[in-house]
Image: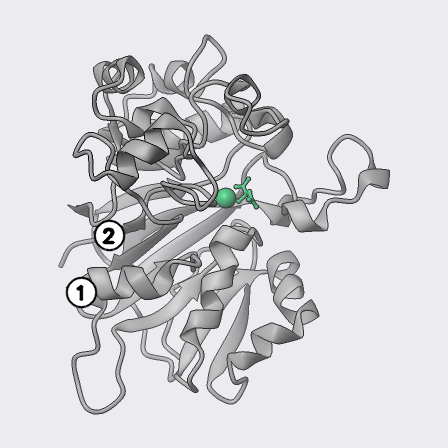
Amino acid sequence: MALRVLVLGAAAGGGFPQWNSNNEASRRARAGDPAARPCTQSSLAVSADGRNWVLLNASPDLRQQINDNPQLHPKEGVRHSPIVSVVLTNGDVDHVSGLLTLRESHPLAVYGTGRVLSVLDGNSIFNVLNPAFVDRRRITLDQAFEPAAKDGRPSGVVIEPFSVPGKVALYLEDAGAGANFGTVEEDTIGLGLAERGGTAYCYYIPGCAAIPPGLGERLEGAPLVMFDGTLWRDDEMVVQQAGVKTGRRMGHLSMAGSEGTIAAFAALGIGRKVFLHINNTNPVLLADSPERAEAEAAGWEIGYDGMEIVL
Ligand code: MLT
Ligand code: MN
């Protein structure tokens, strides 16, 4: 037994290259430059037995991600999928819209906080996941659970959901609700992932706005942390004229600087540190950039589609 983690999509919302991005990095990616490897949108799969997989977020690129990863190909009979359940970490478009790909009356279980499930309940298009086949199961913060298939078969992966600093999904922002746009605790969660009955464990936190002391203590000494790598610096989208928002405004802590993720993790003694959810403006996507060299020198790995880690 082991805990297997498969990166389905290492990019943030929009992917790399993003459909309307004409920046140099996106042009290099489209030209097939090996130092500018394309990445699909944010999602992970985890398995305790290598046969049954739990999706962590469902990206709009899910169809391509399934086709690209033989672990997720149908294996038996006329209709089959190794995907038994899906766990959502927030209600963002890049994390929930792939659920629509999982229609076709296939048995599944979808797990989310009450807040995130209320988004699915409030958008009738998600009823294409035929309720007769797809359960929606509510998770409770700080209560470990073992995702199971629709028929109750346990996955062997124990998941601990916990709130992290973040922001409500863009399309749910309430401008009248003050500085946090109506964000609540259940809007953005991190996941502790462990093998049932084993010793392997890791953390998956694809969106995070800050690292308060309690979060640092939780992550300290972990064998593997996969963490929000949206931006290199907070004003990067503004400087590149790719948008008007800072990372802070979007609910993402940036990598660089004395207040950044790289500095915050420096003393935590983590075995492997992997950036995921990387925005198309982030220079670490380019294998020959000084920022990539700086992140790697600080002990970080830059996630990529198809990256598989066995713990
Ligand atoms: C985010 O991670 O900030 C969101 O996915 C942004 C978006 O919805 O495009
Ligand atoms: Mn996102």
The residue that disc 2 covers is 6
* Of the pair 262 and 170, the residue shown nearer to us: 170
What distance separates the C-alpha of mark 2 from that of mark 1? 9 Å
Residue 301 visible in rendering: yes
Q: At which x and y percent is residue 78?
A: 23, 91
Q: Which of marks 2 and 1 is nearer the N terminus?
A: 2
For image coordinates 55% across by 51% down, the residue present is 90
Element assignment for label 2 = strand
* Of the pair 199 and 115, the residue shown nearer to us: 115
Q: Residues within 10 Å of mark 1 (few under 14, many from 20)?
A: some
User: How was this image coloured?
Assistant: one colour
Q: At which x and y percent is residue 155?
A: 30, 68
For image coordinates 24% across by 70% down, the residue present is 52
Image quadrant assignment for residue 61: bottom left
For image coordinates 47% across by 45% down, the residue present is 13
Q: Residues within 10 Å of mark 2 (few under 14, many from 20)?
A: many
Q: At which x and y percent is residue 289?
A: 26, 18
Q: Are marks 2 and 1 in contact (CB under 8 Å)?
A: yes
The residue that disc 1 covers is 71
Residue 156 visible in rendering: no
* Of the pair 21 and 71, the residue shown nearer to us: 21
Image quadrant assignment for residue 131: bottom right
Residue type at mark 2?
A: Leu
